Every structure is written in structure tokens, then in C-alpha cells.
Amino acid sequence: MRGKLLDDRAREVLPEPHWKRETHVMVAGLRCRWPTLVARSRLDELLDELVDAPAFLPFWRTPIPVDKAPSTTIQLRDLGTGKANEYFRQTSQPDFPHHRPWRIYTLSPKSPAR
């Protein structure tokens, strides 16, 4: 999330509308689920880092409408070639062998690279 809000290259890698949608999902998700994701002290650290990012507060204050569920696909641009490819996006929380306090964000190519 920090990279998406604080690193200008994120907007190059995630062409619109993907940057806005993905960043909003992450910020809104943190706002809604922070008690299950991070301790209050860690949330305060994150907010101190992110509050100065121009896009942060609008995303923090705006819930994602129920009819605007995030897509399972995302487009990423290779900064070296400028070519954009589509990926399936998934988050998971490993439960085996033990319940983990973290999540995994996975991107799988939608179609084979050519």
C-alpha cells in the first residue's frame, strides 16, 4: 500500500483504472479490517506514513460501494518495454499448518507470456 501511494512509479506500473481501484481496495480494506490485520500501534505508524499522500484521505474516507466489487483481474505494465499484461489477483490467508497472522497477495498471468 505504501508503494502504491508514495511511489510515483506505481501509476506507471498500474495503468488507470487499475491503480485507483487497487489502491482504494487496499486503503478501504485497512480501514474496515484493521482490528483483525494489525495492532493499533502499527496502524498508527502506517497512518503517519500515509496521511501525507494526496490520494490517501479520499480513499480512507470513501467506502467501496457494494455494487463495485473489485475485479479478479488486474493489468500491470512492464516499465522496461511499456507492454501491459493481465493477471489474476488473489489474496489468501494460510491456515496450514498453523493459522498465520498475515496474508499473501498473488498475481498469476491470465495468459501465457509471448
Image (cartoon, helix red, strand yellow):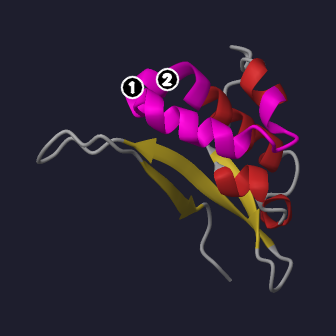
- Judge from the rendering whether residue 111 lies leftward or rightward of residue 38; answer left or right: right
As helix, strand or loop, the secondary structure at mark 1 comes to: helix
Magenta span of residues: 30-57
- Location of residue 111 by image quarter: bottom right
- Location of residue 28 by image quarter: top right
Image quarter in which the C terminus is found: bottom right
Where residue 74 sits in the image (x, y, percent)? 69, 52
Placement of 19 over or under 9, stated as above or below: above
* For the residues bearing labels 1 and 2, Cβ distance under 8 angstroms: yes
73 or 79: which is nearer to us? 79
Where residue 109 sits in the image (x, y, percent)? 58, 65
The 10 Å Cα crowd at callout 1, few under 14, some 14 to 19, many 20 or more, is few
Please tell me whether the stretch drawn in magenta is mainly helix, strand or loop. Answer: helix
Question: Which residue of the protein is positioned furthest toward the left in this rendering?
Answer: 97
Residue type at tag 1? Thr
- Judge from the rendering whether residue 40 lies leftward or rightward of residue 32; answer left or right: left
Q: Magenta stretch containing residue 52, yes or no?
A: yes
* Residue at the image point whose x is 25% and y is 43% from the top: 100
Name the residue tied to disc 2. 33
Where residue 3 sits in the image (x, y, percent)? 68, 58
As helix, strand or loop, the secondary structure at mark 2 comes to: helix
Name the residue tied to disc 1. 36
The residues tagged by marks 1 and 2 sit, at their Cα atoms, a distance apart of: 6 Å
* Residue at the image point whose x is 47% and y is 38% from the top: 42
The 10 Å Cα crowd at callout 2, few under 14, some 14 to 19, many 20 or more, is few
* Residue at the image point whose x is 64% and y is 36% from the top: 47
Q: Magenta stretch containing residue 95, yes or no?
A: no
- Location of residue 40 by image quarter: top left
**Which numbered marker is on residue 100?**
none
